[in-house]
Image (cartoon, grey):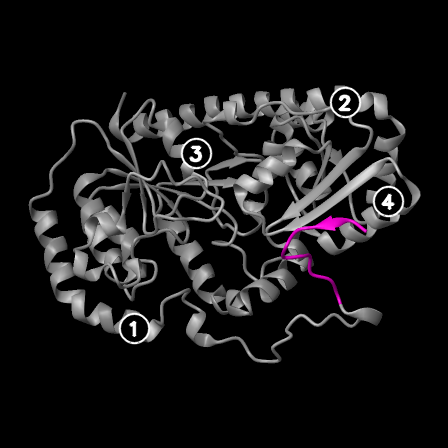
Amino acid sequence: MCAKGSKGVWMPDRNGWSLLNPSYRAPSPWKKSGSLNPLVTSLVGLIVALPFFLSLTALYLFRRKNLKPKMLYATHPILFSEYKPFIAQYHSATLFSFNEHFANINTACIDKSAKDLLPAFLHGFDTRLFGSYIGFLWAIRHFDIFHLFFDGGFLDRTPFWRLEPLIYKLFGKKTIIYHYGGDIWTAFQNRNLIHKVAQNINERGRNFLLDRKKIRRIYLWSEHADFVIAQSYGVEYLPRTDLLIYANHILTDKERYSYAFDSTEPKVKIFHSASIGFRKGSPAIRQVLENLQQRHSTIECHISEGLRREEYLHRLDEMHIFIEQLTDGFISFTAIEAMLKGKIVVTHLDPQLVRFYKQLDYAYYERFFRTIPIIDASVENLEEKIEALLADREGLAELSRQNREFALQLLHENETMYRQSVDAFIAAHYGA
């Protein structure tokens, strides 16, 4: 049997009957706005509306212009925990987050949190409840360019979320909008059936309850944002894209990812780890690895779900082959991390996305997909692909080095292009 983590991996019931909702209860509508009860947020909105808009009026009448544009990355550190430290080397940049702690994300780069702005007597409440308004007033006063996600606006969980893009325009602020996944995925638009089902399993149904707001929010920001950046699959959900990248990953602390591939190990160690196993294809991966282990005494398989980041990276060091996913169809941040450590990465690349990006920029992406050392696998051929790797044990070390070199080159290209893009945006709006 494959060793597994403490949480195990979701598996379907027997005989093809897959119970996706063991509670046998409908999703709770009270959770459709996240952790905040919508009745509470509406009540707070009524209470703070007058002082909030009076404060906005005062800020507008006495607004000031910074000598050089100041940028704010907000309101959570997904992706921005790497983007902001990188761009801060060249421009004035600050990272704000409502929360100070995020699982599996380095939060040391957060410069300001909601608690830093809230008076002590409000610390016992959800930071978004009052922090949305106080944080927005603070941000409007101090910053010129706002880097946000589609769900990352300060007022997103308030009754006034539709006004936020318009207020930025009124104050002459500039907005660059990104996506990270959950902020744009909708059950209505998602053509990935595994993702659609996984959203219901892991969010207990509340995800699709947000679909109508997500779509309205996407169109609202697409209409009013100054620039929209999308990566890989984002083009499927967004009506507007100004900059499109297949793999947009940046890592400022590459030294943390030292090369680790032990060719002297008697057994080939295969690792699969996912925060949400079903969404990554873990049930099929587990069965394939168990089949292989029955036939090969020279392999050692490890499957984990829900590992904390430090534990995951520690265990990754000991492995040779990392099976990332069979469902997403693009290169994830997790795959890049494994490549940097010299792991042979097995993952699924959506052929439709590959064709699309080749049509966008054939000269670059034809070479990109031809030279990428990732092992492209699907649920139909995963067993065959692993067998081929095991049959060429001597070639694994060279493939390992190719993975690290490719990842380093990709990250260097991304850093160069991201800086050029931000520089060009600033020049377009503020002059050279």
- Which span is picked out in magenta? 1-12
Q: Amino acid at mark 2?
A: Ser
Residue 293's disc number: 4
Marks 2 and 4 sit apart, C-alpha to C-alpha, by 20 Å
Q: Earlier in the sequence, mark 1 or mark 3?
A: 1
Q: Disc 4, disc 3: CB below 8 Å?
A: no
Q: Residue at x 86, y 35 (%)?
A: 298
- Asked if the stretch drawn in magenta spans residue 9, the answer is yes
Residue 106 position by quadrant: top left
**Cα distance between the residues tagged 4 and 3:** 38 Å
Q: Are marks 2 and 1 in contact (CB under 8 Å)?
A: no
Q: Position of residue 206 (x, y in %)?
A: 51, 68
Q: CA distance from mark 4 to mark 1?
A: 54 Å
* Comparing labels 4 and 1, the label whose residue is closer to the camera: 4
Q: Which residue is mark 2?
A: 263
User: Contact (CB < 8 A) between labels 2 and 3?
Assistant: no
Task: Label 1, secondary structure: give it.
Answer: helix
**Viewer-side residue, 290 vs 235:** 290
Disc 4 vs disc 1: Cβ atoms closer than 8 Å? no
Residue 82 is tagged as 3
| Nearest to viewer (mark 4 / mark 3) | 4
2 or 3: tag closer to the N-terminus: 3
Q: Amino acid at mark 1?
A: Val
The span from disc 1 to disc 3 (Cα, nearest Å) is 34 Å
Q: Is residue 348 visible?
A: no
The numbered mark, 4 or 3, whose residue comes first in the sequence reads 3
Where residue 276 sits: x, y (%)?
61, 54
Amino acid bearing label 3: Glu
